[in-house]
Amino acid sequence: MEKLTFTMENYLEAIYELSSDGNGARISDIAERLSVTKASANSAMSTLSEKGLITNEKYKEIFLTPSGREHAEFTSKKHRVIQEFFTKILRVDAVIANRDACAIEHVISNDSIYAMQEFIRTEKLNHTTRNFRGTHCSNPGCNNTKRP
Amino acid sequence: MEKLTFTMENYLEAIYELSSDGNGARISDIAERLSVTKASANSAMSTLSEKGLITNEKYKEIFLTPSGREHAEFTSKKHRVIQEFFTKILRVDAVIANRDACAIEHVISNDSIYAMQEFIRTEKLNHTTRNFRGTHCSNPGCNNTKRP
DNA sequence: ATCAGCAGTTAGGGGAATCTAACTATATAG
DNA sequence: CTATATAGTTAGATTCCCCTAACTGCTGAT
């Protein structure tokens, strides 16, 4: 997977999220989502298509190539993990967590993403077990059970 | 506190860490620490001094102004919180945690930093209590106590 | 079938950060 | 005290990403 700038990673992610079942993304929508001008979005499309990550026929909708899709999915997955970790474990407000995830996803290591994922998974198990046994849950913000 | 680019925040942090009790930082050391050329570091110093964050007399050591120090300390504190959270809570390798902290510190919200800090504090309390009571600790990677 | 309005494109420019290369200043070893 | 190594500076080019302004292409309402 080729190395991309954060900016390009964001464009790719936007295209991924704006495309749905057979439909591609439009320059205007991409521009709006990323709060840039159409000119900027358009120029980014040249860059991404040179890297083989999107199709870019003039005046046509934009589609991800398999390689572009793979890259976008990976970024998007990191986003989801961070978002979930920040909201569910750290109990950060969803809007702020989303903003943070949007920035952090481009710079965080795979190791740390994996660790967050495992942490979430483990916490879930603990919740289930502990709730089943009726014991107090020590996770911050967990109000499912009360101390006897 | 004025808005700074990530790059400038990094330069400021480097100066902070390279200065010690009355001594300022040197261009060469700053450049080396950030893996850029002396020319780049030098040009960054002009920017920072225009913003009133450092003193920058030609051929003299570089000192933080009160405002620069304040900014650097804040960044540095965020770095420490992230580093501690990633190593102690997520059990990520220290070197990787450091790299991640170095990038994340510039983009993460104050809310999330605060949440990490609180999480660490709470975990510490739980450890103490639980260990005292001799119960099993469910925190990932905690091997202090065993289930009876 | 036309044309107004919207979508997309192109050209040109600017700021931020980096580099190399060539320069000047400082300081220290002899 | 001078020579030379090291530190710092300057100039100029490059890359990335953004902008505005002005253009071209497309399409649906009449």
Image (cartoon, coloured by chain):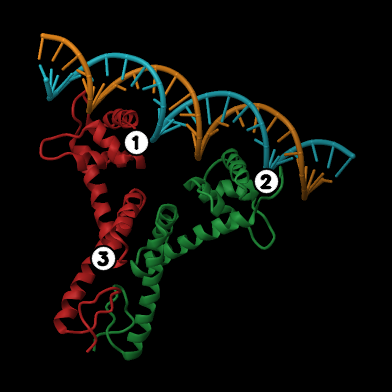
Chain colours: A green, B red, C cyan, D orange
Q: Nearer the viewer, residue A138 or A78?
A: A78
Share a chain, discs 2 and 1? no
Of marks 2 and 1, the one in the foreground: 1
Q: Which residue is pictured at 60% across the width and 55% down the height?
A: A67
Q: Chain letter for mark 1, please.
A: B
User: Does residue B31 appear left or right of residue B60 in this picture?
Assistant: right
Q: Viewer-nearest of labels 3 and 1?
A: 1
Distance in Å between CA atoms under marks 3 and 1:
31 Å
Which image quadrant for residue A41? top right
- Mark 2 belongs to chain: A
What crowding class fits label 3: few (fewer than 14 Cα within 10 Å), some (14-19), or many (20 or more)?
A: some
| Residue C30, picture quadrant | top left
**Relative to A70, is A78 on the left or the right?**
left
Q: Pointer 3: what residue?
A: B88
In front of the other: A53 or A76? A53
Depth check, mark 2 against mark 3: the one in front is 3
Q: Is residue A127 above or below residue A5?
A: below
Image spot of residue B32 (x, y percent): 29, 37
Q: Residue at x 16, y 75 (%)?
A: B128
First along the sequence among labels 3 and 1: 1
Circle 2: element type: loop
Q: Is residue B78 above or below residue B131?
A: above
Kind of residue sitting beneath label 1? Val
> Mark number for residue B36?
1
Q: In terms of image quadrants, where is residue B139? A: bottom left
Question: In which chain is the residue bearing label 3?
Answer: B
Q: CA distance from mark 2 to mark 1?
A: 36 Å
Q: Which residue is mark 2?
A: A56
Task: Pinpoint residue A95: horizontal percent, then vertical percent.
Answer: 42, 59
Amino acid type, residue under disc 2 in the picture: Asn
Is residue B144 found left or right of A117 in the rendered image?
Answer: left
Residue B16 point in image, percent of width and height: 21, 41
